[in-house]
Amino acid sequence: MSHTEIDISPRAEELHARAIVINALCSSNSTPKKADAEFGLPEIMNDGGVTAVNLTISVKDDFKTTIATFTHLLNAIDRRADDVRLARTAADIRAAKAAGVPAIVAGFQNSDPFDGNLAYVSLFARLGLRISQLTYQRRNLAADGTGEEADAGLSVFGRSLVQELNKERILIDLSHTGERSSLETIELSSAPVAVTHACLQSFNPVRRNKTDETIKAMAARGGVFGMNAIARLISPNGNAEGATVEQFVDQIDYLADMVGIDHVGLGLDINEGLTPEGFAERRKGFLTEFPELRMGGDFPFEHYYAFGLTSMRNMRAITETLVRRGYSDEDVLKVLGGNFLRLFEEVWGA
């Protein structure tokens, strides 16, 4: 058996089948961008036993472009109404699990779609937006991203935006937000916040990862941290050597010891269906626009994600590794999705 394969025990299979499994971040490349685009995410989710996913609608698009993408997604869900649902509440996710149908949570990885207009927060909430980051890597109207060395805090608009997101019961995500802005948001927000997809600076000290200080502050207010499956975030040697599921779970162990198991979840940040050809295009485009996300250099396609975690289809490998590490059934169910479901219920309402 190679290091990319793992045998799944009967106990892990049973736990995974019983769990409400939540992947707190799926790449925007899985979101329909055209009116007639195919929407293959439900099959991937079903194969992986995934109940719900936070699907990125916008990374850096403006209001007009984001409205179009949101419309394409809602229409795609309508066309496949028997196969997939839009989740607006925690109850919708529970109902999807009971029906055996995957649920999509609409999310932004940036506040740029609001175009500096707080009234648009309410509009997107009515469409079904349930999670939003403040910024993606760069400085915008609201805050600094993790790619900004200056690490400035929230702007006046950013502080108003935090309060508006609270009012509209949209979960604030700090995954790509700079440290100072993150700490200020945690203090200001009247609701718990999340880091849906990141790794730990204690294991790999790059700015894109989160410090223990930020994680402790987030957890103290009831937030949840989603572990990321990108190899170059997991390990400082991820570019050259890749990373393993064991290293992924090492960070879950660390989080559980530091802030408690109730604040740990999964946010794989996987670009479903990425091919070597697509990776080559991503290297020339996205990874050139955000060079800091290369984590110091180029890397082969095989080292993009942790070995054996290249898709949501592989999520049972996490369940099996948690079982082998001696986690109780209750704690496995919390990590797989129970903790994020609790957070969703608190922020969105039952």
Image (cartoon, rainbow, N blue to C red):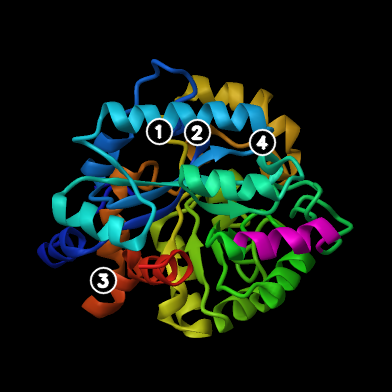
Q: Main secondary structure of the magenta part?
A: helix
Residue 194: image quadrant is bottom right
SS for dot 4: loop
Tag 2 residue: 70
Q: Mark 3: few, some, or many residues within 10 Å (few <14, many ≥20)? A: few
- Residue pictured at 41% horizontal, 79% vertical: 262
Q: Taking 47 as reference, is 253 left or right?
A: right
Note whether 261 is above or below 109 in the view shown.
below
Farthest-out residue, top: 36
Nearest the viewer among 264 and 101 is 101
Amino acid at circle 3:
Arg
Q: Secondary structure at mark 1?
A: helix
The residue wearing badge 3 is 324
Q: Nearer the viewer, mark 3 or mark 1?
A: 1
Q: Is residue 303 left or right of residue 237?
A: left
**Of callouts 2 and 3, the N-terminal one:** 2
Locate residue 183 relative to residue 43 in the image: left or right: right
* Residue 74 disc label: 1
Which sits in the foreground, 105 or 250? 105
Q: Is residue 345 above or below residue 49?
A: below
Q: Read off the residue under disc 4.
A: 298
